[in-house]
Image: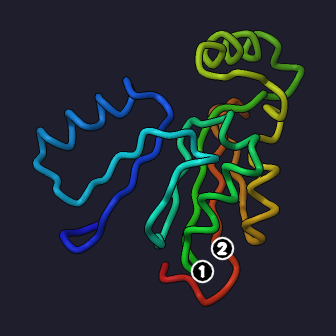
Amino acid sequence: VGPDGAIVGIDASEQMLQVAGERVAEHRWDNVELLVAPVATAAIEHTADAALFCAVHDVMQSRTALSNIVDHLRPGAAVAAIGGKWPAPWTWPLRAWVANLHAPFVTDFAGFDRPWRLLADLVPDLQVRELAFGAGYLAVGHTPGDRPLM
């Protein structure tokens, strides 16, 4: 983000933000704000140029959470999401591994076949690429509006 930019990290887990806070302090980053709150109800006071959703399946399944983030992005802002997903049914050994890997972090596997489906409603040019033999995905696009900076 450079010296003039800022980062807002949001997580409902105080433990996760404590880890992030330690890293922020270690690097003496004074342009990082960490909010302990569920994403759906986080009080976001900024308009951002981009949003990154990383391994947050439960957030990706909440229209309210996604809207709260997208509502605080400028028109044409970059949006990226990356995480796990179900690979093809015929890769049943891989599916078992994916389930075991994600189970501690996912409340409900509903929507795990296309985790980006709700985000696609808010980011019309969303393009998705499957990774890791279909066990992961990267989705990128922009909010509606002005031409993107990228």
- Tell me which residue sits at (82%, 50%) in the image: 117
Neighbour tally class for label 2: few under 14, some 14-19, many 20 plus, Cα within 10 Å: many
The quadrant in which residue 125 appears is bottom right
User: Residue 143 got which mark?
Assistant: 2
Query: Which residue, given by chain and number where applicable, does mark 1 sit on?
Result: 76
Q: Residue furthest right?
A: 89
Q: Which is more toward the observer, 104 or 44? A: 44
Q: Which is more toward the observer, 39 or 54? A: 39
Look at the image and name its color scheme. Answer: rainbow
Q: Residue furthest bottom?
A: 146
Horizontal arrangement in the rendering, residue 83 relative to residue 64 (left or right): left
Mark 2 near mark 1, Cβ–Cβ under 8 Å?
Answer: yes
- Image coordinates for residue 112, horizontal then vertical, percent: 79, 31
The quadrant in which residue 57 appears is top right
The quadrant in which residue 147 appears is bottom right
User: Residue 110 got which mark?
Assistant: none
- Image coordinates for residue 16, horizontal then vertical, percent: 39, 28
- Tell me which residue sits at (46%, 45%) in the image: 10
- Tell me which residue sits at (60%, 80%) in the image: 76
- Image coordinates for residue 93, horizontal then vertical, percent: 76, 10
The correct choice, above or below, for 125 with respect to 37 in the image is below
Q: Which amino acid does the dot numbered 2 rest on? A: Thr
Quadrant of the image containing the N terminus:
bottom left
- Image coordinates for residue 110, horizontal then vertical, percent: 84, 29
Horizontal arrangement in the rendering, residue 37 relative to residue 88 (left or right): left
Q: Which amino acid does the dot numbered 1 rest on? A: Gly
| Secondary structure of the residue carrying numbered label 1 | strand
Sequence-first disc among 2 and 1: 1
